[in-house]
Image (cartoon, coloured by chain):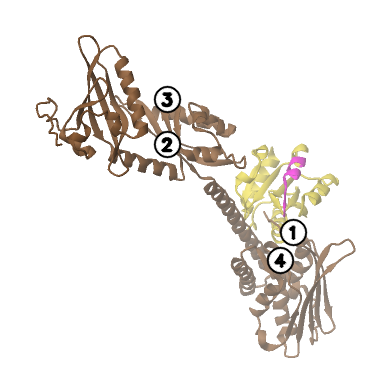
Chain colours: A brown, B yellow
Amino acid sequence: MHVRLNAAWPFHHLPVPVFQTDGNGRIEHVNRHWLRLLGKDADEVLGRPLSSFMTAAAARRHELVLHELVLRDTCGELCGIDSEFAIGDGGILSVSLSYSVERDETGAVARILGTVIDQTNRRAEAQRLKTIVDSVPQLMWRATGDGNCTWTNPQWFELTGQRLEASLGQGWMNVVNPDDRPNGERHWRTALRDGVIDFESRLHRQADGAYIWHRVRGTALRNADGQIVEWIGTAVDIHEFKDMQQLQNVLLGELQHRTRNLLAVVQAISGKTLRRSATLQEFATKFDSRLSALSRIQGLLARTNNDTLDLKQLVELELDSHIDPNRGKVEITGPAVGIGAASGRTLILALHELTTNAIKHGALGRPEGRLAIGWNVVTDQGGARQLSFEWRESGVAMPPDATDDTCFGFGREILEQTLPYDLNGSTQFQFGADGVCCNIQIPLPFVEAQHG
Amino acid sequence: MVDGNPKTLESRRILVVEDDHTIATNLAYSLQKLGATVVGPANSVASAMLLINGGETLDAAVLDVHLGSEKVFPVAEALLTRGIPFVFTTGYSASSIPTAFADQDLCEKPIDTRALSRMLSARLAN
């Protein structure tokens, strides 16, 4: 049987899907747009309940709607009711239904007219948006114009353990660190005036009870009159960023301090060298040489990443910068010992003086001279570890004026005063029969001094 | 260089607390050139306290803030109690000094001897 649609039905030509049922919800008329949307023929639908084409859940909702409409005294209308039609092979069509009821003179429901709007695209779009909102790492929130929370996304719950209902109104404040609440409230007060909000606050993380720094930002939505009607915003985890920022400040401060301190040492060495120099030429040579030793330790420090220097590396660095390491005049023996940065600077200055003096007056300045450098870590009865370092030159007939202060003055000051003062150590410096011998004792571990 | 400067610290006894020997002795030399007698230098809080409590007459002090792993503030506290003026020196920023000492002078490293001498003289004149 092929049933033709009634072209005389007043709504037949409306360019939207339209239907008409009797008072019991049975279809009396539909137009061709309606048939096309549902993919049906007229003979499949006329005389059958509208709800029979819906999914089970939508059908139940439809019955409730009808019930509601019928109970109302006058002509009733309900618009924008979400519904779903079952189409094709298990397909579902999402629609928005609007109903209008006409009553007869006795007040009974004579017919129900309605329109169907295809919501497939809109629902899919809404689903995509929901997926985005649910999957972004940011916490998101919405609030009323006066700043009362109306919604938080699942990420809010995941972090704070606070359910949506608990976060509403001012409830979200309960997971803000109490110390940060006054600041948050202050920002909200100005935000309600300015229409933007941006502040940092710590939120309670349920997993471990820690407070995690977040940057809270929001934008106001305004109505035509310019009044703020809603807020939409985010809260972004900036904890690691804050940590890095803090670390950077510490490092910058440390760099500044080390630079200033190094300049202070250079200033002091310049003064000391000047006071011991007879001529400007002597000053220039000695100051340049000492500055080079400081540069070497600075370079070595730049190549290490934990501020610890290897003693052997340090000794070789200084000697190799003055003499050919392959000449076999120097023997270096000792276990691996880590030296702190500030201690290393004092040590290299001491080694520098010993080396330059040995070249000028001692074992490194003559073919028959030999130098033995050795060290050990010894533990005393109290369990305290100590570095025992020896510099022993041999094959040197000491000149009669070797003990003259002008030759060894600055070097002996470094060895006998600076080393004990800076490193809490002790030094024995001797002119032996065949060369200089210097013993240095320094407690370990080196207190990694923060010279300030 | 301080040579030629008036002996602005003539006969003043000044405690030097500084853990770097090279800097400490150079500072001591500069102070001596200004006529001062240097007490110390001390490289730790303990050694500075020994000098303060050991009956040394002190007119003023120069205090390096960071002494190895410790800070000089107990020494500053002791000097405040005794009414002995002092000047901090540091390679760190002024923010490394507690607000309790906000009224004290700070001489950044490397030390400008003339600035330090002016600060000490002003404190001694009060």
**Image coordinates for residue A111, horizontal then vertical, percent:** 22, 20
Task: Please determine whether, in this image, residue A220 is positioned above or below residue A107.
Answer: below
Q: Alpha carbon of mark 2 to alpha carbon of mark 4: how far?
A: 52 Å
Q: How crowded is mark 1: few (under 14 residues within 10 Å), some or many (20 or more)?
A: some
Q: Mark 2 lies on which chain?
A: A
Q: Is residue B23 left or right of residue A113?
A: right
| SS under mark 1 | loop
CB-based contact (under 8 Å), mark 3 and mark 4 = no
Q: Alpha carbon of mark 1 to alpha carbon of mark 3: how far?
A: 58 Å
Magenta residue span: B68-78
Label 1 in the same subunit as label 4: yes
Mark in front: 3 vs 4: 3
| SS under mark 2 | strand
Q: Is residue B71 magenta?
A: yes
Residue for badge 1: A447
Residue for badge 2: A233
